Amino acid sequence: MKLKTSFLIITLFIFCTGTVLYAEDKVVAVVNNEIITQKDLNDFLNFIRMQYSQQFKGKALEEKVGAMRLDLLQRLIEDRIMLQQAKTDKIAIQSSRLKDRIDEIKKRYPSEAEFERDLAKQGLVLADLEKKMREQMLMYNIVEQKVRNKVVVWPEEITNFYNQNKQQFLKPEERVLTVISFDDENAAKTVSYQLRSGKKIEELAGRYTFTIDKLSALQGQQLRAEIEDTVFKLGINEVSNPVKIEEKYYIFRLDGILGSQQLSLIESQDKIQAYLFEKKLQEALTKWLDELKKQSYIKIFEN
C-alpha cells in the first residue's frame, strides 16, 4: 500500500511540475522574429517588483506592481521592439557602466547576502538582473538617439505657457516660525505653558534644556502632517502645545505670515521648461513607438 501511495504522489508531482513548466513556456506574443513567453512576463513583473521594493513595502508595493500588471504585455512588446531597433542600429553599452548600475542597486541593501536573498525572493538570479539592466540601458540609449536629442523647447513656448497659466505660478502663503525642540516631554509642556503665559524664551533658556531654530513653511510643501496641522492653525505670536515627532518634542511659535505672491517668468521658467520638455518627449516617444509597431509583425495570443 505504501508503495502504491508513493507512486501516486510521484506521478502527481511529475504531472503538476510538467503543467507549471508548460505554463511558463507558453508563448503569449510574437514580435517580428522573437517570441514572448509567460516566463518572460513573470520575470519582467519580478524585476519591476524588485525595483520598487526599496521605495514601497507590503500592501503599497503590491498595489504599485498590480497597477502595472494590466499593461505589462504591451510594455514588454514595446521594450522588445526598442531592443530590436537598438540591435539594428548597433547600439552598445560599456560593461563598466553596467557594473556601476548593479553596484548602485547593491548599495541599497545592508549586505550582499540581503541583496541575493531579495533576488531569490523575486525568483531571479544575478544574471537575470544584469540582463534586465543591460536591456534598460540599451533602450535608454536608443531613445536618447532617436527621440530625446530631437526634442526642443523654444523660449517663446515657455513665455506663452507662463502667460496662459499664471495662476499655476503663485507662491502660497509662507509661515515664519520659531521651533523649540526638547528631549524631555515635561520640560516641553512647561515651557509651552510659560511662553503662552507671557514669558520670554530668553528667560527660560537658563532653566530648561532646549534647542531653538527658525523655519519657513509653505502649506503643502513636504511638511510632516502633524507639523502642518499644528503650524497652520496658529495666530501671530501664538505658541503651540508640544508635538511629539519620533523621540523629540517640538513647540512652534508663529512669528509672521508672508502673503501669497505671483512668481515671475524668470522664477518659473525652469519648472515650465521641465514640464514642456517631458510633455514633448512623451508625445514624440509615443509617435516613434507607433511607427515602429506599424513596421513590425506583432501577434498576441489570447488566453
Image (tube, rainbow, N blue to C red):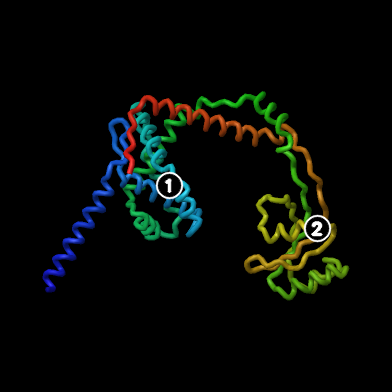
Q: Is residue 113 visible?
A: yes
| Vertical position of residue 148 compared to residue 49: above or below | above
Q: Relative to the observer, which residue lies in front, 108 or 281?
A: 281
Question: Which residue, as the protein is rendered here, is positioned at the far front?
Answer: 303
Q: Amino acid under label 1?
A: Arg
Q: Residue at x 20, y 57 (%)?
A: 15
Q: Relative to the observer, which residue lies in front, 180 or 275?
A: 275
| Vertical position of residue 85 compared to residue 64: above or below | above
Q: What is the secondary structure assignment of the residue under circle 2?
A: strand
First of labels 2, 1 by sequence position: 1
Rendered image: mark on residue 254: 2
Q: Amino acid under label 2?
A: Leu
Rendered image: mark on residue 69: 1
| Vertical position of residue 210 compared to residue 265: above or below | below
In the rendered image, residue 88, in percent from the top left (x then y), is placed at 34, 27
Q: Is residue 87 left or right of residue 66?
A: left
Rendered image: mark on residue 278: none
Q: Is residue 138 visible?
A: no
| Vertical position of residue 153 compared to residue 191: above or below | above
How packed mark 1 is, by other alpha carbons closer than 10 Å (few <14, some 14-19, many 20 or more), is some
Alpha carbon of mark 2 to alpha carbon of mark 1: how far? 47 Å
Q: Residue at x 75, y 74 (%)?
A: 187
Closer to viewer: mark 2 or mark 1: 1
Q: Relative to the observer, which residue lies in front, 80 or 144?
A: 80
In the rendered image, residue 255, in percent from the top left (x then y), is placed at 82, 56
In the rendered image, residue 16, in percent from the top left (x then y), is placed at 23, 57
**Image quadrant of residue 135?**
top left
In the rendered image, residue 126, in percent from the top left (x then y), is placed at 33, 50
Q: Residue at x 75, y 58 (%)?
A: 231
